[in-house]
Amino acid sequence: MMIKLNNISKRYVLGNVVTDALRNVTLTINDGEFVAIMGASGSGKSTLLNIIGCMDTPTCGEYYLNDRKVSELKSKDLSEIRNGKITFVFQNFALMEKYTAYENIELPLINRRVPAKERRNKVWEVAIRLGIEAQLRKLPKQMSGGQQQRVALARALASGADVILADEPTGALDKKTGIELMKILNELNRDGKTIIIVTHDSAVAEYAGRIITISDGRII
């Protein structure tokens, strides 16, 4: 899935306070790339990721997914993109606390109305791949940070999305667990997934094939 942004800007207005989070960002990410977006806190990197993931809309500029202009898509089309084409992995894992690991991984499949037997097979498939089959009956609070992040990644894989967006995916992990996670993302990229990560850690960014640096809302 090719991602193309032309002169994307994002402005937030709160009372008399105006914040330009992104300023004329032009960027192309090709299908199957592994890209790291680096920048300090407040540089605009998470805003950029949210726009790519169709979770936010630009104030101006054009965004294309596979030559489809996102601003012209209907809400149903955007929902389909978020449910099956692009998926997020967050720093804080974003797991449903009252759901087991199995139920968390199953959620995107339920949203897509996948039959129960197919859901079960898919959950076990991704759990085994990420080495968390022994965690499936546990609640998030019963798992380590590394195990929770693997569950979050398994949920992303279960969605079948072509693009995985990861916002500071190692931020809540110790160094060893963070390295393990980045190796998994590398493997997924070799399997054809497009990976886009946001990070302020240069060691994490080095796993990517291309590093984009953003400062004050501009690519530098």
Image (tube, helix red, strand yellow):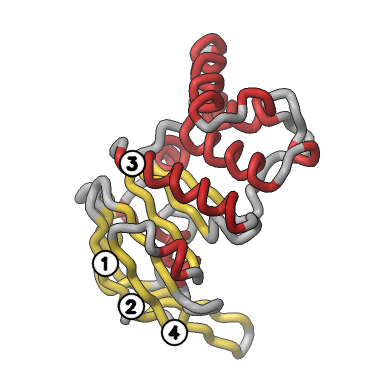
Label 1: which residue? 27
Q: Which mark is residue 216?
A: 4
The structure residue drawn at horizontal position 79% and vertical position 41%, both measured from the top left corner, is 141
Residue 166, position in %: x, y? Answer: 48, 53
Marks 2 and 1 close (CB-CB < 8 Å): yes
Residue 119, position in %: x, y? Answer: 53, 18
Could you say which is closer to the camera, residue 98 or residue 61? 98
Marks 4 and 2 close (CB-CB < 8 Å): no
Label 3: which residue? 193
Query: Mark 3 or mark 2, which is nearer the start of the sequence?
Result: 3
How would you rate the neighbour count of disc 1 (Cα within 10 Å): few for under 14, some for 14-19, many for 20 or more?
some
The image quadrant of residue 57 is bottom left
Label 2: which residue? 219
Query: Mark 1 or mark 3, which is nearer the start of the sequence?
Result: 1
Could you say which is closer to the camera, residue 157 or residue 209? 209
Could you say which is closer to the camera, residue 16 or residue 99? 99
Q: Is residue 155 left or right of residue 5?
A: right
